[in-house]
């Protein structure tokens, strides 16, 4: 082996090893765990070899914000809980210099659920707060290889998904959105970076990282290079110019995407590119509880952006796992358990008001607030989120989608002192 540094060698990470070690399982395609309160994220940090977003780091982050800005609730509440090399990004911010953002989505279905919005809500906040360019990758190729869907269908999903992404409020002057099949056909620079990465990673290495086996198709084996390449700004000469100097990249993503970027960070120095930095989020629990994440293929376990206000209400009332007592008497006496209560957990993600959240925590834990009442709180918050999203999405025409997807220069100034 030899080359996969970053603690990867010592840390059992293959599919088999994960199962042996404990019952949480996390890779880019599957998340399951044995506890109703969700995966043990500290163990994940240890196993993946990333670092916790500490209070000290948050203080530094906060101090670096533009005047009047407040840390996003996803940072305040430990939802983006883990990172790799966030310090070089903070150094840049503190010096008033720029970096770029990269995130993405696998277009496996036409409609998104609220969990899919998390990286995009956060990325938009980063873009607005630090005024930086952003690239968004839609891995239609990945979903073709993994899901057995027709390419035409996936392409349709991609366009629908892009509308949902744009509806999160990204600035067209600062954002390039692409599907892999489209951009590969247009950009020599992107394909050349993919090739360079492919030459540097062996089958053995991707087997170790992703658990590929001998009967996986060769497309899967080569794919990780395609998700890696946008981490390097030289994949986008129309945005960053044709110099071989690479800009620093920050990737906000759910922690299940980390294997791709461990591989990316390992090859970066060999290409004389900077390693991308990462901020990892936890998973939004499924309605039935945090043993699994919300999934597009399980409609009773997910709130979709296309759900009506009534559907949201019914799903929460019927399916949201409750941490409340078995009877009203028991609940009044012992109180509810916010750690496992799905309504409370969703409020952590989507209710911005810290004081209100704290009060709900107090009242529900003491038994003063009943399960039906906490459900009512989250129903209102989610209905509001979904309705606003749909209003924004209605405004996104095909022409707007095309503008975001056109390879072009973006409006920003990179401070390139080095
Ligand atoms: N593989 C991701 C998914 O299935 C999509 C993706 C591509 C991505 N590039 C990314 C996610 C960068 C986060 C960051 O959803």
Image (spheres, rainbow, N blue to C red):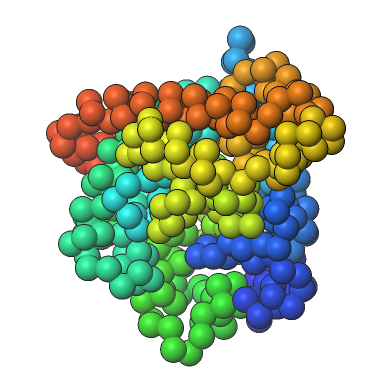
Q: What residue lies at 74% left-to-right and 28% top-to-bottom?
A: 364
Q: Can you tell which quarter of the image residue 219 is in?
A: bottom left
Identify the residue at the far bottom of this view. Answer: 214
Viewer-proximal residue, 10 or 87?
10
The answer to whether residue 274 is seen in the rendering is no
**Relative height, residue 40 to residue 223 (above, below):** above
**Relative height, residue 377 to residue 123 (above, below):** above
**Quadrant of the rendering where the N terminus is positioned:** bottom right
The answer to whether residue 313 is seen in the rendering is yes
Residue 149, horizontal then vertical, whole percent: 27, 68
Viewer-proximal residue, 137 or 165?
165
Residue 217, horizontal then vertical, whole percent: 38, 82
Q: What residue lies at 72% left-to-right and 74% top-to-bottom?
A: 12
- Side (left or right) of 303 relative to 162: right
- Side (left or right) of 398 relative to 210: left
Residue 17, horizontal then vertical, whole percent: 70, 78
Q: How many labels does the image show?
A: 0
**Quadrant of the rendering where the C terminus is positioned:** top right
Residue 65, horizontal then vertical, whole percent: 63, 20
**Relative height, residue 153 to residue 71 (above, below):** below
Identify the residue at the far top of this view. Answer: 68
Viewer-proximal residue, 114 or 128?
114
- Side (left or right) of 13 relative to 205: right
Q: What residue lies at 51% left-to-right and 85% top-to-bottom?
A: 213
Q: What residue lies at 73% left-to-right and 19% top-to-bottom?
A: 359
Q: Can you tell which quarter of the image residue 90 is in?
A: top right
Identify the residue at the far left of this view. Answer: 399
Q: Can you tell which quarter of the image residue 323 is in?
A: top right
């Amino acid at each position: 082996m030899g080359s996969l540094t970053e603690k990867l060698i010592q840390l059992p990470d293959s599919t088999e090893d994960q199962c042996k070690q404990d019952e949480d399982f996390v890779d880019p395609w599957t998340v399951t765990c044995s506890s109703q309160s969700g995966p043990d994220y500290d163990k994940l940090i240890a196993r993946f070899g990333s670092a916790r977003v500490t209070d000290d780091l948050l203080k530094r982050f906060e101090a670096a914000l533009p005047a009047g800005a407040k840390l996003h609730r996803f940072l305040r509440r430990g939802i983006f809980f883990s990172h790799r090399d966030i310090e070089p990004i903070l150094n840049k911010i503190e010096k008033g210099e720029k970096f770029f953002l990269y995130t993405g989505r696998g277009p496996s279905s036409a409609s998104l659920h609220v969990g899919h919005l998390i990286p995009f809500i956060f990325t938009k906040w980063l873009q607005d707060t630090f005024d930086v360019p952003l690239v968004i990758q839609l891995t239609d190729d990945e979903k073709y290889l993994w899901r057995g869907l027709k390419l035409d269908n996936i392409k349709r999903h991609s366009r629908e998904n892009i509308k949902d992404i744009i509806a999160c409020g990204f600035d067209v002057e600062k954002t390039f959105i692409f599907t892999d099949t489209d951009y590969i056909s247009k950009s020599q620079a992107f394909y050349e970076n993919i090739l360079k990465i492919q030459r540097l990673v062996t089958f053995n290495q991707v087997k170790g990282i992703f658990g590929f086996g001998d009967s996986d198709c060769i497309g899967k084996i080569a794919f990780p290079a395609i998700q890696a390449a946008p981490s390097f700004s030289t994949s986008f000469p129309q945005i960053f110019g044709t110099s071989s100097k690479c800009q620093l990249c920050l990737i906000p993503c759910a922690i299940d995407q980390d294997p791709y970027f461990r591989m990316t960070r390992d090859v970066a120095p060999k290409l004389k590119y900077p390693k991308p930095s990462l901020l990892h989020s936890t998973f939004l629990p499924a309605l039935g509880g945090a043993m699994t994440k919300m999934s597009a293929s399980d409609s009773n376990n997910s709130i979709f952006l296309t759900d009506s206000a009534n559907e949201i209400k019914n799903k929460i009332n019927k399916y949201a796992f409750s941490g409340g007592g078995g009877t009203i008497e028991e609940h009044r006496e012992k109180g509810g358990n916010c750690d496992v209560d799905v309504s409370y957990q969703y409020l952590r993600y989507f209710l911005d008001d810290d004081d209100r959240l704290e009060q709900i925590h107090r009242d529900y834990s003491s038994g003063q607030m009943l399960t039906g009442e906490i459900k009512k709180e989250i129903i209102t918050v989610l209905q509001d989120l979904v309705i606003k999203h749909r209003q924004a999405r209605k405004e996104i025409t095909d022409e707007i989608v095309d503008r975001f997807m056109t390879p072009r220069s973006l409006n920003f100034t990179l401070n390139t002192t080095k």
